[in-house]
Image (cartoon, grey):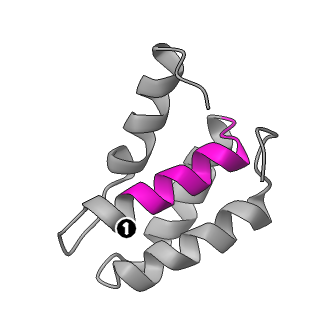
Amino acid sequence: MDKKIASKEFIEGWLTYLAIAFPKNEENFWGLLAERLQCYGCSELEVSKAVYSIIDYTNKEFLTIAEILQPILIARELNIVD
């Protein structure tokens, strides 16, 4: 896993973890989220960190696209890199 742009397959693999953690989100939600992550050119590192942080720190039944994308975009804006 590194900072290269995440492929569709890579993103879908990680979103499987979220689909298990948030089963009340509808199936088409996951496809739309994958498209958004690709549209923003998210790296493998950004996707994996986003999934881990959502699973670790979110205690609710539903997930929104903004809850995944906002931390990524804020980190980019602030130039926070690992």
Say what amino acid the circle numbered 1 marks.
Answer: Ile
The answer to whether 65 is drawn above or below residue 74 in the figure is: below
Q: Where's the C terminus, which quadrant?
A: top right
- Residue pushed farthest front? 82
68 left or right, relative to 49: left
Q: Where's the N terminus, which quadrant?
A: bottom right
7 left or right, relative to 39: right
Within 10 angstroms of label 1, few (less than 14), some, or many (20 or more) residues? Answer: some
x and y percent of residue 56 in the render? Answer: 34, 65
In terms of secondary structure, where does tag 1 sit? helix
Task: Give the dominant element type of the magenta stretch: helix, strand or loop.
Answer: helix
Q: Residue at x 75, y 63 (%)?
A: 10
Say whether residue 23 is magenta. no
Q: Residue at x 78, y 41 (%)?
A: 5
Q: Residue at x 48, y 15 (%)?
A: 77
- Examine the image and state in which quarter residue 40 appears: top right
Residue range of the region highlighted in magenta in the rendering = 41-53
- Residue placed most toward the observer, 60 or 65: 60
